[in-house]
Image (cartoon, rainbow, N blue to C red):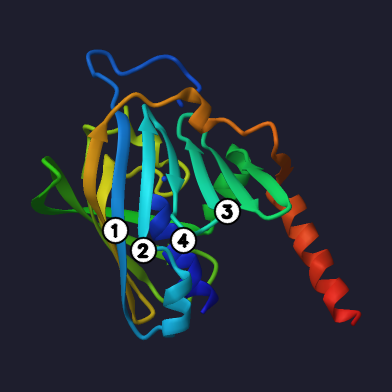
Amino acid sequence: MKKIIIALLICSSFLTINTISAQKKGKKSFAGTVTFKISYEGDIDPQKIAQLPTKQTTSVFENNTRSVFPGIPRYIISLGDSCKQIILFDIPGSQIAVISNKEEVLESIGNLNYTYEKTGDTKTICGYVCTGYKITITDKEEEDSEEQTVITYTTTEIGLNNAINSTSTPGLEGFPLYSQLNANGIIQTIEATEIKKSKVSIVDFMIPTSYKTMTMSQLRELQQQGSDDEDDF
């Protein structure tokens, strides 16, 4: 079940402020929001499905994204050019910003091998013509692990270059507007339903001053301490 959840997060993370001012010459940067619907099929506990997101709204500016999941107190910010990820947890009595720098991001996905193969077809989504890819994900460290397959359709009209995917699917060309993951008997589909060009504030990609910042390692230590305290009762 742990691998299933990781796989779902990977897929979700496909659809997640440039720290460098340079842009591709002659290419106008997209700024706006993309709304996605998320659905699940297969052998999964209905109670677990009820806890998973069914909608995602992603603000995009250049190679940077901020994803919000209604009903879930978590926001994911991806700074593509610096390969940095920030997860904001907004829970009663505690606002925490967990920062993963480039080294930590690469370490988290370093044991995974991504293979990209064009499917040869296209799909028009919300007016954008998207190129189809088959993504194969394998675990380098576990030879007996099950291969994961993702069918995705991407557009190069959103994002400056491949760096927009640096924290999730490094090397994938284009911003995914459709992704379907099939792993361990579960199918997760994420598809854009609305794309709006609009002004995006730089503040959306910053950590609010009210949040306490920490690294992913520090968060794990806190979680471990909480688990240990529960064991004492």
- 2 vs 4, front mark: 2
In the rendered image, which residue does mark 3 sit on?
108
Task: Give whichever of discs 3 and 1 has the lower sequence position.
Answer: 1
The quadrant in which residue 101 appears is top right
Q: Amino acid at mark 3?
A: Ser
Q: Kindly report the distance in space between the C-alpha atoms of the residues bearing marks 2 and 4.
A: 13 Å
Is mark 1 in CB contact (under 8 Å) with mark 2? yes
- 3 vs 1, front mark: 1
Nearer to us in this view, 147 or 183: 183
Residue 9 is marked as 4
Residue 37 is marked as 1
Task: Give whichever of discs 1 and 2 has the lower sequence position.
Answer: 1
Q: Amino acid at mark 1?
A: Lys
Answer few, some or many: residues within 10 Å of disc 2's Cα (few below 14, many 20 plus, some between 14 and 19).
some
Which of the image's four quarters has the C terminus?
bottom right
Task: Give whichever of discs 2 and 4 has the lower sequence position.
Answer: 4
Residue 91 image offset from top left, x and y in percent: 65, 55
Residue 15 visible (yes or no): no
Residue beneath the point at 73% across and 54% down: 219
Nearer to us in this view, 70 or 116: 70
Answer few, some or many: residues within 10 Å of disc 4's Cα (few below 14, many 20 plus, some between 14 and 19).
few
Q: Kindly report the distance in space between the C-alpha atoms of the residues bearing marks 1 and 4.
A: 15 Å
Residue 54 is marked as 2
Q: Kindly report the distance in space between the C-alpha atoms of the residues bearing marks 3 and 4.
A: 12 Å
Nearer to us in this view, 133 or 178: 178
